[in-house]
Image (tube, rainbow, N blue to C red):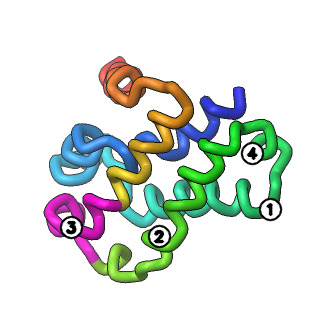
Amino acid sequence: MGSETFARQLVYLASTSLQERFGVRATRDSYVLLDDVLERASDCVRMVTSNHPMAAKLPAEVRAAILALEPRLSDDKFSRLSWIEATVDPDWKALREQAASVFAAMGISLAEWEQRELRSHDA
């Protein structure tokens, strides 16, 4: 249960295809805001730093991967970028790759989570 909560919070940050679909090619009815994606990731970091019971159950490797997001999340330039700008920004790419590494540390397939999200929006 704990890993799934963190995966749900981080999937849009980790996924290039979800950023393309719901950020760059967003529609009025199907979109995600860049600031919301950043806030969800920040929530994950806060849960780990505050030793939230759900975060405390995670393996040390997963907690470390989540904490590694923090220095990049504190770069407030992201809140000034559009999705199009973010997707080509090298710092955003590094942040996205770090979020993807959280999935790897959890042993969760990012590709499967991407498909799950896409199906949930197509239903």
The one nearer the camera, 109 or 34, is 109
Span of residues in magenta: 81-94
Residue 55 — which label? 4
Identify which amino acid the numbered label 4 is placed on.
Ala
Q: Position of residue 56 (x, y in %)?
A: 80, 45
Tell me the SS state at disc 4: helix
**Secondary element type, mark 1:** loop
Q: Which residue is mark 1?
A: 50
Image location of residue 103, percent across then percent down: 47, 36
**Magenta segment, principal secondary structure?**
helix
The answer for how far apart the CA atoms under marks 4 and 2 are is 18 Å
In magenta segment, residue 2: no
Which of these two is toward me, 105 or 46? 105
Q: Is residue 91 magenta?
A: yes
- Look at label 2 and name its amino acid: Leu
Residue at position x 54%, y 68% from top? 70
Secondary structure at badge 2 equals helix
Residue contact at pointers 4 and 1, CB within 8 angstroms: yes
Measured as percent of width and height from the top left, residue 60 is found at 69, 44
Is mark 4 in CB contact (under 8 Å) with mark 2?
no
Decide which of tag 2 and tag 1 comes sooner along the chain. 1
Task: Give, as a three-letter code, the residue at label 1.
Answer: Ser
How far apart are labels 4 and 1 at the CA level?
9 Å
Q: Which mark is residue 73?
A: 2
Q: Secondary structure at mark 3?
A: helix
Q: Please report whichever mark, 4 or 1, sits nearer to the chain's N-terminal start.
A: 1
Dot 2: few (<14), some (14–19), or many (≥20) neighbours within 10 Å?
some
Name the residue at 80% across, 62% down. 50
Residue corresponding to mark 3: 90
Instruction: Mark 3 or mark 1: name the one nearer the start of the chain.
Output: 1
The amino acid on which the numbered mark 3 sits, given as a three-letter code, is Pro
Q: Nearer the viewer, residue 104 or 92?
A: 104
